């Protein structure tokens, strides 16, 4: 499976009574398709997956598959500190029709590199779908090293890509140099998409594209096409917006702007909370300059 382009780490809309807002979710997905994104990533961190029950995750993935109708690739998130639980989530995503499964490095319990290898190989062997490894040490508390990644891809042929969110372009180029076409690199940081593509990444799993799918898709495509002057201009135009988007957690920013656009309510599940006033002012100021 070739993963390339813009994939949106999509939000999960909620009603004021804290249920999943399915009509709003369909509006958000339709907006993504209209914006030309390559894929949708439901049940990731931006989708508030830690607050979703397993039944809710299954339904979110199934409804995503049904709503996009093959117009976008569905890469379902599966994350937990328990290998057995992740394997069950991966099987659930496969059964719901996801095209691929994104598996985050286990968080909080800080496994060894050997433990991480065993985790990803066990999960990969539990399903037939392609696996995207999600390395985000700032949140998981442990970094998946290059040697461990090599052991994983050797043992698990369906591990085909990594969402690289170390915030380090040097790591991206190390991955590209070591694995070549064997492992697709996808940027996990909107502000680093262009630099990462310059050293071998093939796209982005984006938070910003929740709000401006067309703009992120265009900037990513220009970079992938090698049109550096136009790619640089498109990317730099968005950088102040990317920065404002992450003053507070990106899901809060995305939902504030999606609510502003009338696509969903500005409701998050605790412990996540709506944007504070200072962050909101900065975000909306940056958004107005690109909208």
Image (spheres, rainbow, N blue to C red):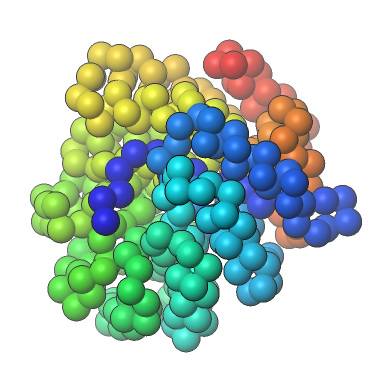
Q: Residue at x 19, y 78 (%)?
A: 155
Q: Position of residue 260 (x, y in %)?
A: 75, 28
Q: Position of residue 240 (x, y in %)?
A: 51, 23
Q: Is residue 17 visible?
A: yes
Is residue 73 shown above or below 278?
Answer: below
Q: Residue at x 68, y 23 (%)?
A: 284
Q: Quadrant of the C terminus?
A: top right
Is residue 95 shown above or below 260?
Answer: below
Indicate left or right for 249 with 126 as reference: right
Res. 170 image quadrant: top left
Out of 252 and 113, give the one closest to the viewer. 252
Q: Position of residue 52 (x, y in %)?
A: 67, 66
Out of 93 and 77, give the one closest to the viewer. 93
Out of 103 and 92, give the one closest to the viewer. 92
Q: Quadrant of the N terminus?
A: bottom left
Out of 62 and 252, give the one closest to the viewer. 62
Q: Position of residue 61 (x, y in %)?
A: 57, 61
């Amino acid at each position: 499976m070739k993963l390339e382009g813009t994939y949106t780490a999509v939000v999960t809309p909620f009603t004021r009574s804290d249920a999943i807002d399915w009509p709003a979710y369909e509006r958000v997905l339709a907006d993504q398709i209209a914006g030309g994104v390559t894929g949708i990533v439901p049940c990731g961190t931006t989708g508030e997956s830690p607050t979703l029950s397993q039944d809710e995750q299954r339904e979110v993935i199934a409804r995503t598959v049904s709503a996009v109708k093959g117009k976008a690739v569905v890469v379902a998130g599966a994350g937990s500190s328990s290998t057995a639980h992740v394997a069950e989530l991966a099987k659930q995503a496969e059964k719901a029709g996801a095209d691929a499964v994104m598996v985050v490095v286990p968080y909080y319990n800080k496994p060894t590199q050997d433990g991480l290898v065993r985790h990803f190989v066990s999960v990969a062997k539990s399903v037939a779908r392609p696996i995207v490894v999600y390395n985000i040490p700032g949140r998981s508390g442990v970094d998946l090293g290059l040697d461990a990644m090599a052991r994983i891809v050797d043992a698990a042929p369906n591990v085909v890509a990594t969402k690289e969110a170390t915030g380090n372009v040097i790591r991206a180029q190390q991955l590209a140099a070591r694995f070549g076409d064997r492992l697709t690199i996808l940027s996990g940081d909107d502000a680093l998409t262009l630099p990462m593509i310059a050293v071998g990444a093939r796209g982005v799993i984006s938070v910003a594209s929740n709000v401006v799918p067309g703009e992120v898709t265009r900037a990513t495509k220009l970079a992938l096409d090698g049109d550096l002057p136009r790619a640089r201009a498109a990317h730099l135009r968005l950088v102040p917006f990317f920065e404002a988007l992450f003053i507070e957690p990106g899901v809060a920013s995305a939902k504030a702007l999606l609510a502003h656009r009338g696509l969903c309510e500005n409701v998050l599940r605790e412990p996540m909370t709506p944007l504070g006033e200072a962050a909101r002012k900065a975000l909306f100021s940056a958004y107005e300059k690109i909208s």
